[in-house]
């Protein structure tokens, strides 16, 4: 089957969950006691639906992303 490449949109897998290089990201827990700031590229962003993550998160799926520790401030 021939696919006209000019008709394709962006491939979401190329930038899964904002894995592009970022200047700075901040986050933390809902109560606000734990906060973090990180810089740099996200490492292995993924979604998990295993029984352990379902129990841990109380939800059918959990989303995870890592960052290099040298760019992480608590």
Image (tube, rainbow, N blue to C red):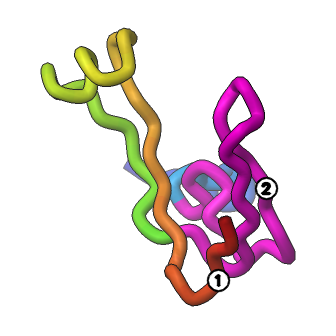
- Is residue 32 on the magenta stretch? yes
Question: CA separation, marks 1 and 2?
Answer: 12 Å
Is 66 on the left-hand or right-hand side of 18?
A: left
> Which quadrant holds the C terminus?
bottom right
Residue located at (16% from left, 26% from top):
52
Residue 37 percent coordinates (x, y): 75, 65
Q: Residue furthest right?
A: 23
Residues 28 and 51: in front is 28
Q: Position of residue 48 (x, y in %)?
A: 29, 34
Secondary structure state at the residue bearing disc 1: helix
Specify the quadrant of the image occupied by residue 36: bottom right
- Residue found 29% across the figure and 23% down from its top: 56
Horizontal placement of 29 versus 6: left or right? left
The residue singled out by tag 1 in the image is 71
Magenta-highlighted residues: 14-42
Q: Quadrant of residue 19?
A: bottom right
Label 1 Cα crowd, 10 Å radius (few <14 / some 14-19 / many 20+): few
Q: Quadrant of residue 24?
A: bottom right
- On residue 27, the disc is none
The one of 57 and 47 positioned closer to us in this rendering:
57
Magenta part mainly helix, strand or loop? loop
Q: Earlier in the sequence, mark 1 or mark 2?
A: 2
In depth, the one of 51 and 71 nearer the eye is 71
Quickly name the residue at label 2: 26
Residue 34 in the image, given as x and y percentages of width and height: 67, 45
Give the residue furthest to the bottom.
70
Q: Image height check: is 72 above or below 27?
A: below
């Amino acid at each position: 089957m021939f696919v006209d490449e000019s008709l394709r949109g962006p491939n979401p897998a190329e930038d899964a969950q904002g894995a592009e290089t970022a200047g700075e990201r901040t986050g933390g827990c809902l109560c606000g006691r734990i906060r973090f700031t990180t810089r740099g590229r996200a490492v292995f962003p993924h979604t998990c639906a295993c029984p352990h993550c379902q129990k841990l998160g109380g939800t059918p799926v959990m989303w995870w992303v890592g960052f290099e520790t040298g760019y992480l401030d608590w």
